[in-house]
Amino acid sequence: MKKPFIVIAFFLVATLVLLIYYTLGGFEKPTVEIIEVPGKYLILGEHFKGSYKSEDIGRLFTKAQSLLENGTVSGDLTIINYGSDDQAEQINQFVGILVTRVPETIPTGYTTVEIHPSKVIRVKISSHNIVMPKPKKIRDLAAAEAKSYGITLPDNSIEIYKSQRELLIDYPIE
């Protein structure tokens, strides 16, 4: 009598887990393409160099999110990654907001960074961050696309958080 109950319970739990995974976009495959960039990337934010375990990186991320949520700045949450070593203890990033123009009043502690690529390799991920692929897998997908065009993938990347379910990762190539 216990065995059929255990089997039924297992299938119900497995079905529930798969349904949640599906709902979060876990079965959505990232797309990779080379696109032309019509203008520049203008990012308003703060530089961070230190341990990826540091609370400061979370503080910078939260500050940028707050500026977007309260309407102080409009744009997309963005992180520039300088370097690509996924195993490194130290990270070098610029955390902020991708804007179309610099606002009249720049938030305290913020500066701007401009990047002028003519083309990027773009990886588009359409799933919740809980089920997104790991950074190494994303980089491997971009590297494979670059290799197919005879291009070396750059160390720097630009992560643009369009929403909780859409992330663009651009690797400037020209």
Image: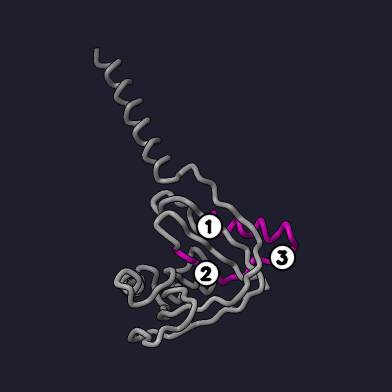
Residue 103 visible in the current orientation? yes
For marks 3 and 1, give the CA distance.
Answer: 18 Å
Residue 93, x across and y down, in percent: 46, 75
Q: Residue at (63%, 75%) from the top-left corner?
A: 117
The magenta region covers 136-161
Under mark 2, the amino acid is: Ile
99 w.r.t. 105: above or below:
above
Residue 60, x across and y down, in percent: 35, 74
Quadrant of the frame with the N terminus: top left
User: Which residue, given by chain and number where applicable, does mark 1 sit on?
Assistant: 136
Q: Counting other residues with Cα less than 10 Å from the Cα at mark 1, is it few (<14), some (14-19), or many (20 or more)?
A: few
Residue 92 visible in the current orientation? no
In front of the other: 61 or 137: 61
- Disc number for residue 158: 2
Q: Quadrant of residue 174?
A: bottom right
Under mark 3, the amino acid is: Ile
For marks 1 and 2, give the CA distance.
Answer: 15 Å
Under mark 1, the amino acid is: Lys
Q: What element carries label 3?
A: loop
For marks 2 and 3, give the CA distance.
Answer: 18 Å
Residue 160 drawn in magenta: yes
